[in-house]
């Protein structure tokens, strides 16, 4: 069981992380030109104290699960501090280009590169107005800094909310017999945390971006029990009923509705009866109506063409239509953590 020293180390580490990315957020805002006022209604906003209180509750919840023995304290992934400093420098170097695209509403540069012609059209965009979209080594290097800055150091802890339902599903069974697939794995941070918490699991991260998978291999490693493969969520390269657990973090709001439905159908196809799908994504407007202004402005400031459709959707109905029954839902700061069970055939 964790000790008081473990708790102090956890609190100090997470506080330092939040402070680091809060500093990135403050410094980055000074580099950006003011955006024109939106020409659509904008809902209410939470105040800073409310956001900070909710974030603190998120960390408290994680520590309570650690103290209960569900999983160990999180590791420091990708521990090279020089690499993180380089990525921070790349992030700030890219900000003026991001701002230029934001004001010009330029978002389809990857679509004009013939090297990406084999990828789905919806994927060939400058999501977040980021240089290269998700299709360059430079983009992979800055992605985690960008996302953690956006969430002021809380992105990883929101991802790690998947660990609780995984732990409860595995129970006392032999982890070595279970297979987990993380779809839209990006730079591989969620598989990295899962492998640390459940070292016996066979974990595979799947993504459409070869540069992001290469980044995951370098930073998270690879082994007999940790693999990375190139593929699409809507066409999973796995046999029917072959996977025990599927995870997806911050993927579904990046998918157009048609592709989202196809991805859920594929998850249902490859899951074993009784298997679980654990999806972490943006909270919905109905979850946080008093925070609606955040949902209104996020796709305006960041290129997120499918975000509004996601936050106004009904995920339980979507998954149920494909044989996946909702078991638990947790609203974790700005995220929604959903667990679905594959109904018996």
Image (tube, helix red, strand yellow):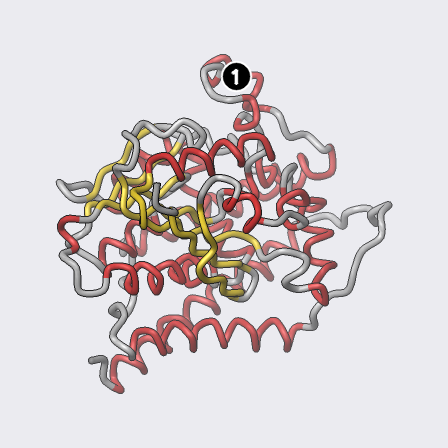
When asked about the image quadrant of residue 238, the answer is: top left
Quarter of the N terminus within the rendering: bottom left
Q: Residue at x 27, y 29 (%)?
A: 239
Q: Position of residue 287 (x, y in %)?
A: 63, 62
On the image, the x and y values in percent for residue 182 come to 34, 43
Residue at image position (28%, 51%) is 192
Going by the image, does 121 lie left or right of 231?
right
Seen at 68% across and 30% down, the residue is: 106
Count the marks: how many? Answer: 1
- Closer to the camera, 281 or 269? 269
User: Residue 293 vs residue 85: left or right?
Assistant: right
Which part of the image, by quadrant, shows the C terminus?
A: top left
Residue 333 coordinates in the image, percent (x, y): 54, 66
Q: Nearer the viewer, residue 32 or 58?
A: 58
Question: Farthest residue toward the front?
Answer: 345
Frontmost residue, 93 versus 117: 117
The residue that label 1 is drawn on is: 113
Image check: 105 left or right of 50? Answer: right
Residue 226: x percent and y percent?
A: 20, 43
Q: For mark 1, does the 10 Å Cα neighbourhood hold few (<14), some (14 to 19), or many (20 or more) residues?
A: few
- Going by the image, does 311 lie left or right of 12? right
Residue 36 sits above or below residue 70 on the image = above
Furthest toward the bottom, the residue is 4
Q: Mark 1: which secondary structure?
A: loop
At horizontal 32% and vertical 49% (from top left) the residue drawn is: 275
């Amino acid at each position: 069981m964790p000790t008081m020293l473990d708790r102090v180390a956890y609190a100090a580490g997470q506080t330092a992380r939040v402070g680091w990315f809060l500093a990135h957020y403050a410094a980055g805002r000074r580099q950006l030109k003011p955006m024109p006022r939106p020409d659509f209604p904008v809902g209410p906003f939470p105040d800073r104290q409310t956001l900070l209180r909710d974030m603190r509750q998120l960390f408290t919840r994680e520590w309570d699960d650690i103290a209960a023995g569900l999983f160990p304290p999180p590791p420091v992934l990708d521990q090279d501090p020089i690499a993180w400093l380089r990525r921070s420098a790349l992030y700030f170097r890219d900000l003026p280009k991001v701002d230029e695209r934001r004001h010009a509403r330029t978002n389809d540069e990857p679509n004009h590169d013939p090297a990406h012609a084999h990828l789905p059209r919806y994927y060939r965009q400058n999501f977040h107005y980021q240089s290269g979209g998700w299709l360059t080594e430079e983009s992979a290097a800055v992605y985690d800094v960008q996302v953690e800055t956006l969430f002021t150091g809380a992105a990883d802890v929101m991802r790690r909310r998947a660990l609780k339902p995984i732990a409860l599903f595995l129970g006392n069974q032999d982890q070595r017999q279970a297979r987990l697939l993380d779809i839209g794995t990006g730079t591989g941070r969620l598989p990295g945390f899962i492998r640390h918490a459940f070292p016996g699991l066979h974990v595979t991260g799947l993504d459409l971006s070869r540069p992001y998978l290469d980044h995951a291999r370098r930073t998270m490693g690879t082994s007999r029990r940790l693999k990375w493969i190139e593929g699409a969520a809507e066409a999973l390269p796995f046999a029917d009923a072959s996977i025990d657990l599927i995870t997806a973090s911050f993927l579904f709001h990046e998918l157009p509705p048609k592709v989202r439905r196809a991805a859920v159908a594929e998850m249902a196809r490859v899951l074993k009866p009784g298997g679980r799908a654990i999806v972490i994504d943006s909270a919905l407007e109905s979850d946080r109506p008093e925070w609606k202004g955040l949902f209104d402005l996020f796709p305006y400031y960041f290129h997120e063409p499918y975000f509004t459709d996601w936050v106004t959707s009904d995920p339980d109905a979507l998954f149920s239509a494909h044989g996946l029954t909702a078991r638990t839902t947790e609203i974790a700061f700005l995220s929604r953590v959903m667990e679905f069970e594959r109904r018996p055939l």
